[in-house]
Image (tube, grey):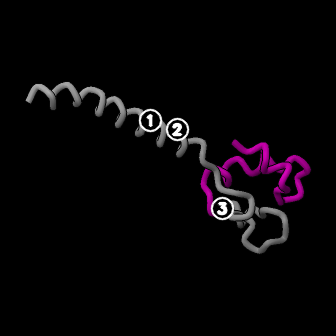
Amino acid sequence: MTRFSRMTPPALLASLGLLTATAALAADDKPTFESLDKNGDGKISLSEASNNDALFVAFKSLDTNKDGELTRDEYAKYK
């Protein structure tokens, strides 16, 4: 029983570290340009952006030339 109790804290710490790392990756995870550009025209339209709530909200500020579409360069600024 003593041996088990010595292993528990390191195992718990390792699990906590794994959960923290997974949460950090999920927070920084953004869809690829290709996955959003459904019609493959090299641009993300407002309609295509509507599939991602956060991108839809940020769309207007990212569309710097105000043409209603995001280029790769404009999308690269999305965080």
What residue is at 71 percent from the left and 47 percent from the top? 58
Assign a secondary structure to mark 3: loop
Mark closest to the chain's N terminus, 3 or 1: 1
Amino acid type of the residue tagged 3 in the rendering: Ser
In the image, is 69 to the left or to the right of 16?
A: right
- Neighbourhood count class around disc 1 (C-alpha, 10 Å): few under 14, some 14–19, many 20 upward: few
Q: What is the spatial separation of the Cα atoms under label 1 and label 2, in whole angstroms?
A: 6 Å
Q: What is the spatial separation of the Cα atoms under label 2 and label 3, in whole angstroms?
A: 24 Å
| Residue placed most toward the observer, 2 or 51 | 2
To which residue does mark 1 refer?
20
Magenta-span inclusion, residue 54:
yes
Extent of the magenta region: 50-79
| Disc sitting over residue 50 in the figure | 3
Magenta-span inclusion, residue 61:
yes
Amino acid type of the residue tagged 2 in the rendering: Ala
Picture coordinates of residue 25, whole percent (x, y):
54, 42
To which residue does mark 2 refer?
24
